[in-house]
Each structure stands twice: as C-alpha cells, then as structure tokens.
Image (spheres, helix red, strand yellow):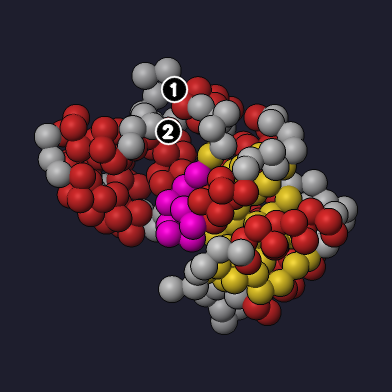
Amino acid sequence: MTISVLIADDQAMVRAGFAAVLAAHEGIEVVGQAADGLEAVALAHELRPDVVVMDVRMPGKNGIEATRALQTPPRGSDYVPKVLMLTTFDIDEYVYDALRAGASGFLLKDATPEELVAAVRIVAGGDALLAPSVTRRLIEDFARSGPPPRPSGTRLAGLTERELEVLTLVGRGLSNSEIAAALFIAEQTVKTHVSKILQKLALRDRVHAVVLAYDTGLVQPGA
C-alpha cells in the first residue's frame, strides 16, 4: 500500500529536499507541497494525503494552527490526516502544542533521511513517534502542564481490567515488548489490546493514549 504525503514548509528548498528524500523510497508518494498552514489545510482536504509533514513555524497560519484545523473535518467529511510535525527547535512548548493540536509525531529537522522516512511510515501505520530527545520526562511534564488529573471513571468505564493494565503501562512509556514481559503475555496480544483501547476510547494513536492516561489520573506524573 502506497503512503501519500503532503509536505508543508515555508522554505522551497526544504520542501524540495523532503520531497526528494521521501519520493526515493518505494511505497511513499509525495502528492503535494504547501508554503504555509492555510495552503496546507486547503491542499490536505483536496488531495487527502495519508500523512501531512508539517513545519511548526510558517507565516500566517502556523503548523500548530493548521494541525488543529485538520483535526476538525468540514461538514460531510470524515477525513482527518496523520500529522508529523517538523521543527528546527528542540523546545518543549512546541511538543506540548503539537500534541494538544492532534499531531501523531514530532521530529527535529536535523533527523537523518532514514529517520524521516521511518517516521512517515510509523505515523501512517497508526503509531506515534517522538524525537529521540523527547523523553518520558517530557511526557510527564506535558501532562503536568495540563488540567489536574480527573478520576478515571466514565471515560475508561468501557475498558476491561486487562485493557486498563495495558493502558497504564502505555502511559508509563513502555513499549509493546516491555508490556508483554511485564504482564506475561504475547507481544501480539499486547498489540491487540492497544488496538481495542484506541478504538474504544476513540483515540488516533499511542501518543494520545499516553496523554489520556495522565489526563484521567490513571497514571500520575513521576510515577
């Protein structure tokens, strides 16, 4: 299956470079390029790419605003693309804003071409990706900066006991293999649980499951 990609960056040479890197790999097609957030939103609705590679800093509507706009499809449409945020700035506030806006990935522009390609594939596949410099501590700080944790009651009521266990470990930053080892179950079983959790809670990917785990109080910062 081919992954269609839209690139949004205000620098033409950067757009061309990203396009060349991605187009050189089998299974990835660059369907369009945008010079700002407003154009990115318009082209995304027109071309319906699987992934939008979005720069954070752009004139007019910036990448965060454009990402937020793409999470609310126009009337009569159910199209919501996955967004991979790119920036030259390794600053926490951009990560916080990008995650709250609905981004599924965050990568610095100094990443290698191989890392960019891998990030697009990961995000397109429904998983979440953060730059290696974005650690579990950042996730905890992000959760702490938001509203105080609420009781986990109604939002999580539809989850089974095992799914709550898996969500808790996802929230603590464990990988599928680490969760499998912790719960003495197969890694494929973990993947199935994660998929069901995302479906039941109407979450787009793993990063938003982490955020929900903190926001509902299921996982406490520093735990």
Q: Amino acid at mark 1?
A: Pro
Residue 112 is one of the magenta-drawn residues:
no
Residue furthest to the front: 24
Residue at point 27%, 56% (across, down): 196
Residue 51 % position (x, y)? 57, 63
Q: Kindly report the distance in space between the C-alpha atoms of the residues bearing marks 2 and 1.
A: 7 Å
Residue 123 is one of the magenta-drawn residues:
yes
Is disc 2 in contact with disc 1, using a CB cutoff of under 8 Å? yes
Give the labeled residue for mark 2.
Answer: 214
Work out whether residue 73 can be spotted. no
Give the labeled residue for mark 1.
Answer: 221
- Residue span colored magenta: 121-129
Q: Circle 2 — which element?
A: helix
Residue 9 % position (x, y)? 78, 56
Residue at point 70%, 30% (across, down): 91
N-terminal label among 2 and 1: 2
Q: Quadrant of residue 187?
A: top left
Residue 19 % position (x, y)? 70, 62
Q: Amino acid at mark 2?
A: Tyr
Dividing the image into 4 quarters, which one contains the N terminus?
bottom left
Left or right of residue 186, residue 199 in this image:
right
Q: Circle 1 — which element?
A: loop
Question: Looking at this view, is 52 or 62 the one in front?
Answer: 52
